[in-house]
Image (cartoon, rainbow, N blue to C red):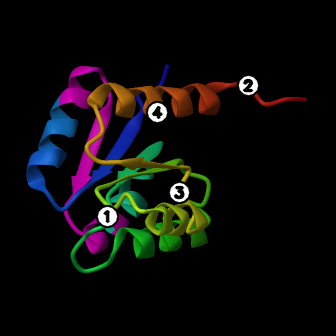
Amino acid sequence: MEIMKILVVDDERSINSYLQRKLTRLGYTVFTAEDGVEALKQAFTHLPDIILLDVNLPKLSGIEVLKTLRADERTKSTPILILSARAQGKDIKAGLKAGANRYLCKPVSFANILREIRAYAEISSDPPDH
């Protein structure tokens, strides 16, 4: 089985390093970015299997990053999970409308994040229907 690549994007370095440490221990390959521009660079360089994306980012917002990823052939179908402290209905709607697969409101437990990652890993490893 191929090792799953995960891109974690959060402007808080402590969140990035926490998730990177926990996910790496479980056998995932993890890349991180702390702003929207770096997020796009990492996404297009590594083509991750799943992206954990914050909304509040310097340089480019998470929503702008999301729209850019959805508009690109290489990343248009990559599962993107938003992890954000913005928990109002309008924020959640905006994230989903921009193309997020899921919108998780912070604080969110590592167990919930892992459950979401594993759900998308199972979906992507399902054999295609013929």
Circle 4: residue type: Glu
Disc nearest the viewer among 2 and 3: 3
- The vertical placement of 6 against 44, above or below, is above
Q: Which residue is mark 1?
A: 39
- Quarter-wise, where is residue 88 in the image? bottom left
Q: Tag 2: Cα neighbours inside 10 Å, few (<14), some, or many (≥20)? A: few
Disc nearest the viewer among 4 and 1: 4
Mark with earlier residue (4, 1) = 1
Q: Which residue is mark 2?
A: 127
Mark with earlier residue (2, 3) = 3
Alpha-carbon span between mark 3 and mark 4: 13 Å
Which label number is shown at residue 100? Answer: 3
Residue 1 screen position, x and y as percent: 50, 19
Q: Which residue is mark 4?
A: 116
- Quarter-wise, where is residue 23 in the image? top left
Q: Tag 4: Cα neighbours inside 10 Å, few (<14), some, or many (≥20)? A: some
Circle 2: residue type: Pro
Residue 26 screen position, x and y as percent: 28, 20
Q: Nearer the viewer, residue 78 or 108?
A: 108
Q: Tag 3: Cα neighbours inside 10 Å, few (<14), some, or many (≥20)? A: many
Alpha-carbon span between mark 1 and mark 2: 30 Å
Alpha-carbon span between mark 4 and mark 2: 19 Å
